[in-house]
């Protein structure tokens, strides 16, 4: 069982909202270092800092392009897989890895709490 799965819709919303705040989106390390540094200095929301720091420190240009297309611009899996020359399943696995990584970072910074007691409760009510 993926214990982070319950957080994915919220994470997608956070990524989409964050994407609207980024001006003239670029994929380079230098661009994301500047954004991460600025958000760290100006006491931005912790979510903004975690997302920008993830994009700078954990992603390469291809990851950033994927995040821009799939999460910021909300392109479909079919459209994004066509751009990257991947099967739909490859795109879904890439998306899953990004969301798991962000879940872990959000837990580490106290932005998300995983309550395992509700998993059985959710399964019973389905």
Image (cartoon, grey):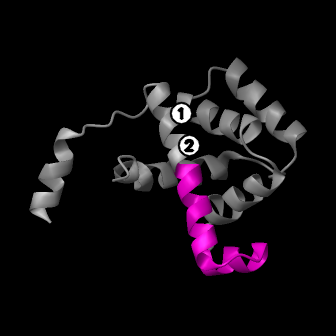
Position of residue 6 relative to residue 113, above or below, is below
What SS does tag 1 mark? helix
**Range shown magenta:** 77-99
Magenta run includes residue 83: yes
Pointer 2 residue: 101
Position of residue 71 relative to residue 106, above or below, is below
Specify few, some or many for label 1: CA neighbours under 10 Å numbering under 14, 14-19, or 20 or more: some
> Relative to residue 118, is residue 87 drawn left or right?
right
Residue at horizontal 76 percent and vertical 59 percent from the top = 65
> Relative to residue 17, is residue 66 drawn left or right?
right
Label disc, if present, on residue 105 of the rendered structure: 1
Residue 81 image-quadrant placement: bottom right
Residue 28: % across, % down: 87, 46
Instruction: Tell me the CA gap for discs 1 and 2.
Output: 6 Å
Magenta span main SS? helix
Q: Quadrant of the C terminus?
A: bottom left
Residue at horizontal 56 percent and vertical 67 percent from the top = 92
Is there CB contact under 8 Å for labels 1 and 2? yes
Residue 41: % across, % down: 71, 18
Label disc, if present, on residue 61 of the rendered structure: none
């Amino acid at each position: 069982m993926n214990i982070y799965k319950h957080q994915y819709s919220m994470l997608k919303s956070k990524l989409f909202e964050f994407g609207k705040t980024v001006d003239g989106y670029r994929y380079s390390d230098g661009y994301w270092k500047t954004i991460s540094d600025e958000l760290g200095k100006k006491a931005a929301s912790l979510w903004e800092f975690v997302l920008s720091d993830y994009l700078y420190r954990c992603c390469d240009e291809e990851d950033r392009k994927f995040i821009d297309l799939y999460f910021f611009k909300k392109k479909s899996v079919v459209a994004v897989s066509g751009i990257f020359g991947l099967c739909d399943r490859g795109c879904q696995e890439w998306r899953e890895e990004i969301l798991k990584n962000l879940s872990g970072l959000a837990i580490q910074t106290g932005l998300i709490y995983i309550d395992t007691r509700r998993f059985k409760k959710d399964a019973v009510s389905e």
